[in-house]
Image: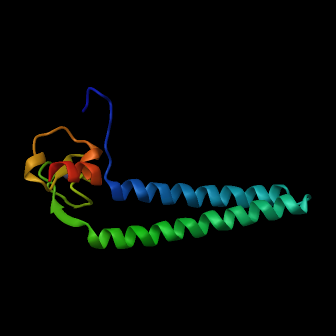
Amino acid sequence: MAEKGLVYSSKINKIRSFALILIFAGILFMYGGILTRNTQWLMLLFFILGVLLVVLSCVVYLWIGTLSLRAVPVICPSCEKPTKMLGRVDACMHCKQPLTLDKELEGLEFDEKYNSRRYKKKKQ
Ligand SMILES: [Zn+2]
């Protein structure tokens, strides 16, 4: 994996950074609204977009909350810190160690495809 230069981050962390980006984008849009306050329709457009993005990020945060409840808490074998897993394969939140709950997948290269429905079907 290191050779490929790919770093897999934990899904929960990924969604969290996505929500953070949404909040920043929302704030930027609202700032754009302040800058264009001379053009009323443009200001209104920026503000509506900004509010929408902030609301969307709140929804994403709520979604993370429910996902965290369903996630399986495990102790990472590499760094020995508690982390949470989503799906069959995920990465440690602290050290990015790829983790799996499936014995069959142990030792295999980490791949997001193991979480997909199609892969599960093929295995059965
Ligand atoms: Zn770890």
As rendered, which of 21 and 102 lies closer to the eye?
102
User: How far across and down, in percent of the image, does residue 39 sit?
Assistant: 91, 58
Q: Quadrant of residue 42?
A: bottom right
**Residue that sits furthest to the top in the current view:** 3
The residue shown at (44%, 73%) is: 62
- Total count of labels: 0
Task: Judge whether residue 43 can be spotted in this image.
Answer: yes
Q: From the viewer's perspective, is 17 left or right of 84?
A: right
**Residue 93 higher or lower than 55, as above or below:** above
User: How far across and down, in percent of the image, does residue 109 sit?
Assistant: 19, 37
As rendered, which of 115 and 109 lies closer to the eye?
115
Task: Judge whether residue 91 can be spotted in this image.
Answer: no
What kind of colouring is applied to the model shown? rainbow
User: How far across and down, in percent of the image, does residue 119 sit?
Assistant: 24, 48
Q: From the viewer's perspective, is 41 left or right of 16?
A: right
The residue shown at (27%, 52%) is: 115
The residue shown at (29%, 46%) is: 112
Q: From the viewer's perspective, is 75 left or right of 87?
A: left
**Residue 38 higher or lower than 96, as above or below:** below
What quarter of the picture does the N terminus occupy? Answer: top left
As rendered, which of 118 and 81 lies closer to the eye?
118
**Residue that sits furthest to the right in the current view:** 38
The residue shown at (18%, 50%) is: 99
